[in-house]
Image (cartoon, grey):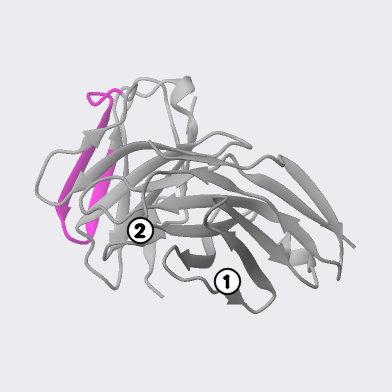
Amino acid sequence: GAVVSQHPSRVICKSGTSVKIECRSLDFQATTMFWYRQFPKQSLMLMATSNEGSKATYEQGVEKDKFLINHASLTLSTLTVTSAHPEDSSFYICSARQGPYEQYFGPGTRLTVT
Amino acid sequence: AQTVTQSQPEMSVQEAETVTLSCTYDTSENNYYLFWYKQPPSRQMILVIRQEAYKQQNATENRFSVNFQKAAKSFSLKISDSQLGDTAMYFCAFMKPLAGANNLFFGTGTRLTVIP
């Protein structure tokens, strides 16, 4: 099956700094990628949808200036959390779509802001 | 927006027994897909089973099978011969074919514990 990787798997950063998370589709081209946030014992909450070569579409309530998404190629999307604060600590998951209905998930990144 | 409801926040089952997780959804679409995803403690989302709405036959994958009732908008997951490795969060999801935009909607999840 298709594989999606995320890097890093865990990151700890200080409050006020920025951190970048990479999402790569390893063996297929993904025209659309998605970023989710998951709080403990809760479902996945969609943050944004990104299409290669165009601006990301953010869900209501998600600050686009805080969560910068770049989908530079058909295999790479990045999420940058700018000026991170402790409340941004969470588990972030990306997914990549292949075809009209196949969507594959990365292993997630645990962000801790101290 | 589509809504997906999982009414069982937590369930438990004895090892080797059978358990059924329920899911209902609301849509006006006729062409769509339904999924069950498993999220073990590692947090990796794993596709368990997929059902196309146009197919009347229920999907099966080894010990996992679904009961798809299109008119009732119900999509339950049956796990037979439960194993300790089945312990995980299970998410029901609805997808409609739509290029370039979000089309995957998750339920709130059911935490399944398999008891040895």
CA separation, marks 1 and 2?
16 Å
Residue name at image x 24 percent, y 26 percent:
A64
- Work out whether residue B101 or residue B67 is closer to the camera in this orientation and state it: B67
Residue A57 forms part of the magenta stretch: no
Q: In the picture provided, is B109 more to the left or to the right than B3? A: right
> Which span is picked out in magenta?
A63-79
Query: Which amino acid type is shown beneath numbered disc 1?
Result: Asn
Query: Which amino acid type is shown beneath numbered disc 2?
Result: Asn
Residue B1 vs B78, above or below: the answer is: above
- Work out whether residue B37 or residue B56 is closer to the camera in this orientation and state it: B56
Percent coordinates x, y for residue B5 in the rendering: 58, 40
Residue name at image x 27 percent, y 42 percent:
A49
- Work out whether residue A54 or residue A73 is closer to the camera in this orientation and state it: A54
Percent coordinates x, y for residue A60 in the rendering: 32, 24
Is label 2 in a helix, a strand or a loop? loop
Percent coordinates x, y for residue B116 in the rendering: 90, 63
Residue position for label 1: B58
Answer with the quarter of the image where residue A57 lies.
Answer: top left
Percent coordinates x, y for residue A52 in the rendering: 14, 52
Q: Residue furthest left?
A: A53
Which of the numbered marks, if any, corresponds to residue B31? 2
